């Protein structure tokens, strides 16, 4: 069962306005995204037909069968646990990480997991490393760790819009310059997935999706049938992911769960300065999912960001709770409740 703090009246009003306008927002305008440009949908369809290949009916059935087959995974299962805390996206925010580790001491969790993206956005990347080790946080690689450890020139965040990519480049370049080679090697030693047993449920922990480390799984754009297929392929009872920066929980008709656990590096684009993480616990027949708001010393973070000369757009998000960058990736419904 998901637990959310009641929305304030201003956010309720904004959400109601978004719902009223959703048909307009999601109406197809006859255009398709091709790389970083919009093209007429007919042109895109014709190009797709030319570059694709035609399958016979039997070939199509065989391709579908191959896609649906369960995948082998030798990842060891950790646990069993009764209660775990899970978060993603530290984004160099050592202030929030320290607050989370203090808070989880009082929540009686059996283990603490981080789903990657330690760096980006915030200041002083190396500050999070000793906190993770001292707090015995069990981490996996996100796209940031994969890129930093392998010497990529970009974060492989998965953005297509030029403005999103501009700020991603600023963030990644700063983090790469300020991470030691030892820290980068340590990031590269982290696994890219974990399996955890909570009660009788086996949960797969990944960064973006089981398919791609940088895949965005937004609530409004991720269908129930698609999620059921992912769970079948991965032979698990639930998937925990992050990457989008927005937390959500969907219990599927099969009784299984998919949870975006949130991030602690920046607010959830909700006008609040708190950040969000998840606590999952065994309730016998169901998995209990709680989304927890985390207050931390955000003025100190903003001060440190300015001291490091990070973009003022980044700082504004920390002090206002509203995203000012990396907005273009948002689907219409998620964008509709944004301030910008």
Image (cartoon, grey):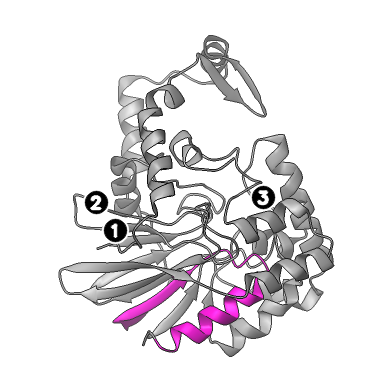
Residue shown at 64% from the left, 76% from the top: 95
Indicate the position of residue 210 as horizontal and vertical percent values. Answer: 45, 54
Going from N to C along the chain, the mark reached first, 1 or 3, is: 3
Indicate the position of residue 167 as horizontal and vertical percent values. Answer: 74, 47
* Number of numbered discs overlaid on the protein picture: 3
Most foreground residue, 109 or 290: 290
Most foreground residue, 321 or 72: 321
On screen, residue 222 above or below 132: above
Q: Specify whether 183 is left or right of 35.
A: right
Residue 287: in sight, yes or no?
yes
Q: Quadrant of the N terminus?
A: bottom left
Residue shown at 32% from the left, 54% from the top: 231
For label 1, the residue is 257
For label 3, the residue is 156
Magenta segment boundaries in residue numbering: 77-106
Q: Quadrant of the C terminus?
A: top right
Residue shown at 83% from the left, 66% from the top: 308
| Disc 1 and disc 2 in contact, CB within 8 angstroms | yes
Residue shown at 38% from the left, 86% from the top: 110
């Amino acid at each position: 069962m998901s637990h959310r703090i009641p929305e304030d009246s201003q956010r309720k009003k904004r959400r109601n306005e978004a719902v009223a306008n959703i048909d307009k927002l999601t109406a197809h305008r006859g255009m398709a995204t091709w790389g970083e440009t919009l093209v007429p949908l007919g042109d895109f369809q014709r190009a797709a037909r030319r570059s694709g290949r035609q399958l016979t009916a039997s070939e199509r059935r065989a391709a579908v069968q191959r896609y649906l087959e369960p995948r082998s995974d030798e990842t060891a299962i950790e646990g069993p646990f009764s209660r775990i805390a899970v978060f993603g996206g530290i984004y160099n925010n050592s202030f929030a990480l320290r607050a989370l580790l203090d808070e989880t001491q009082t929540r009686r969790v059996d283990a603490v997991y981080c789903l990657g993206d330690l760096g980006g956005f915030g200041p002083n990347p190396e500050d999070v490393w000793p906190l993770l080790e001292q707090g015995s946080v069990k981490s996996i690689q996100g796209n940031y760790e994969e890129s930093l450890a392998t010497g990529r020139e970009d974060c492989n965040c998965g953005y297509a819009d030029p403005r999103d990519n501009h700020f991603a480049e600023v963030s990644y370049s700063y983090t790469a310059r300020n991470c030691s080679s030892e820290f980068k090697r340590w990031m590269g030693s982290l696994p890219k997935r974990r399996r955890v047993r909570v009660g009788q449920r086996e949960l797969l922990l990944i960064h973006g999706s089981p398919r791609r480390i940088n895949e965005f799984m937004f609530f409004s754009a991720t269908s129930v049938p698609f999620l059921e297929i992912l769970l079948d392929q991965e032979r698990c009872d639930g998937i925990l992911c992050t990457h989008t920066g927005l937390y959500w929980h969907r219990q599927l008709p099969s009784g299984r769960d998919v949870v975006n656990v949130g991030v602690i590096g920046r607010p959830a684009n909700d006008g609040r300065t708190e950040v969000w993480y998840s606590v999952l616990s065994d309730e016998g027949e169901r998995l209990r999912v709680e989304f927890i708001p985390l207050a931390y010393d955000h003025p100190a973070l903003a001060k440190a960001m300015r001291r490091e000369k990070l973009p003022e757009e980044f700082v504004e998000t920390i002090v206002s709770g509203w995203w000012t960058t990396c907005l273009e990736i948002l689907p219409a419904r998620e964008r509709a409740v944004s301030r910008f």
